[in-house]
Amino acid sequence: PKITAGDVKRANVRTSPESTFLADISGEPASKWAIGKQFYVTDTKINSVFGTPSAQTGDLTGTMLTYTGSEPVTTIVGDPATDFIFTDRSGNRLRYRSVDATRSDTASFDVPFTIQMSVVEEVARRLNGKRYYVLTPIWYDRDGQSYTGRKFIPVEVAAVAPGNNVYPLSLLLRTDDGAAFILFMSVGSNLRAPRGFATLFSFTDPREKYPQISDETWANIIRGRVALGMTRAECRLALGTPDDVIHRNDHNYLYERWNYDNGVYLVFRDDILENYRY
């Protein structure tokens, strides 16, 4: 049946403090670039952007480019364009041509495969030394390999560094017991990838929202573990939303089986975990 305006429920969407915390940070428009501005290179593919043979510049990944100025030019079809000029670590002059870089004096302008260091520096100014509660157990080591950590625990931001093509920021975090790990994060109001501050951190202790959960069960949740007798809500906190749910009932009980893509499954009887496999 057709849905009319009268069928739509209108509600005010609450905006959390975490979701707006870093929303004002973005790269600078090209018109605001100052001579000497630094850009971090995330991928060796940047050589194709400049039309420069790799034999001349080498692999620029992980190095800095320095902005030295711009020149108005005309394309082969007669359209106006701008050449942005950079120098690499060896002093080579590199040109990046754009036909739309100067169309806006407010929007961020990005050179492909680079991160504006002004963004990294501003995030570092706001986060370094601050404590938050981490919401994700997907942690990374210094080699960029992921592993399962803990969630809902306090961590301190030890350093902020450039990230990668998808996530421009790399955060070095430390737990109260001295463990160190890395999280990758996006920033700004229009996130290119859904891993902003609000999905990674909370200003307040998540434990306060669940006073009915016992300390023993909460210890399991922090480590992403389940135990017999836990409720569906508690298991969801521990392992996240399942990929598939199968319902079954008999004359006395309602059964649910939660399946996860890594082979883990949970079996509930009337909301209580009765069986599981990791």
Image (cartoon, rainbow, N blue to C red):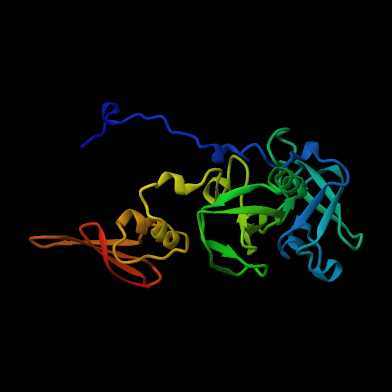
> Is 34 in front, or is 102?
34
Give residue 246's quadrant in the image: bottom left
User: Residue 162 placed where, x, y %?
Assistant: 72, 56
Question: Which quadrant: the N terminus?
Answer: top left
> From this viewpoint, is residue 76 visible?
no
Residue at the location (35% across, 56% down)? 234
Question: Which quadrant: the C terminus?
Answer: bottom left
Name the side, left or right, on which 158 lies relative to 67.
Answer: left
Residue located farthest toward the right when viewing the structure as drawn = 91
User: Residue 186 placed where, x, y %?
Assistant: 61, 50
- Relative to residue 239, is residue 102 depicted above or below? above
> Is 53 in front, or is 248?
248
User: Residue 73 placed where, x, y %?
Assistant: 83, 43
- Relative to residue 193, is residue 216 depicted above or below? below
Q: How many numbered discs, if any? A: 0
Name the side, left or right, on which 31 lies relative to 155.
Answer: right
Residue located farthest toward the front when viewing the structure as drawn = 215
Give residue 10's quadrant in the image: top left
Name the side, left or right, on which 277 lies relative to 198.
Answer: left
User: Residue 177 placed where, x, y %?
Assistant: 61, 62
Residue at the location (39% across, 59% down)? 217
Residue at the location (35% across, 61% down)? 243
Residue located farthest toward the top when viewing the structure as drawn = 6
> From this viewpoint, is residue 273 visible?
yes
> Is 31 in front, or is 255?
255
> Is 118 in front, or is 110?
118
Residue at the location (37% across, 65% down)? 226
Name the side, left or right, on which 41 lies relative to 193.
Answer: right
